[in-house]
Image (spheres, rainbow, N blue to C red):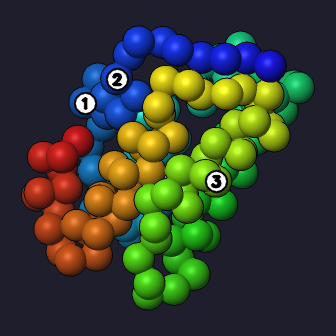
Amino acid sequence: MHVLNTGMHPTSAKAWGMKLPATTATTAAAKTARMATVALNLAVTNDWGDGRSEEKREILHMQVVSGFATGKKAVDPTELEDFLDQFMLQNFSTDADDNSPYEVSLLVCRLHELIMAGSIQEAQELL
């Protein structure tokens, strides 16, 4: 099992030069999660996904999007954190002990909330 503690802030989306697209909230939130987590990027770069790392990253993206798109009820950040932790363990044999699943889940849920409320500028500032 890979245990990561990078010492880097896991949600440094500004470092990725990200701009929030004016598309759907779920797609923007999922792309942010995918790009912001250091553990996921290391797992894909080092191909810890048994030769299917890129595919598994896309599966994660689609599952996060569908989780937000399933209903009007707000997604609970702790549920998203648990999902991200389990996904990383099951698909990349990686335990992200850098707290990134927690940080990313808070960021994604907040972005989703802001975008759904029409606060695009505030969401961009958050990044």
Could you tell which of marks 1 and 3 lies nearer the N-terminus? Answer: 1
Residue 16 visible to the viewer:
no
Amino acid type assigned to the residue bearing label 2 in the image: His
Q: Looking at the image, is mark 1 or mark 3 nearer the viewer?
A: 3
123 or 73, which is in the foreground?
Answer: 73
**Quarter-wise, where is residue 118 in the image?**
bottom left
Provide the residue designation for mark 3.
83
Above or below, 105 relative to 9: below
Could you tell which of marks 2 and 3 lies nearer the N-terminus? Answer: 2
Locate residue 44 relative to residue 116 in the image: left or right.
Answer: right
115 or 8, which is in the foreground?
Answer: 8
Disc 1 is placed on an element classified as helix
In which quadrant is the C terminus drawn? top left
Could you tell which of marks 1 and 2 lies nearer the N-terminus? Answer: 2
Provide the residue designation for mark 1.
14
Provide the residue designation for mark 2.
9
Above or below, 127 relative to 43: below
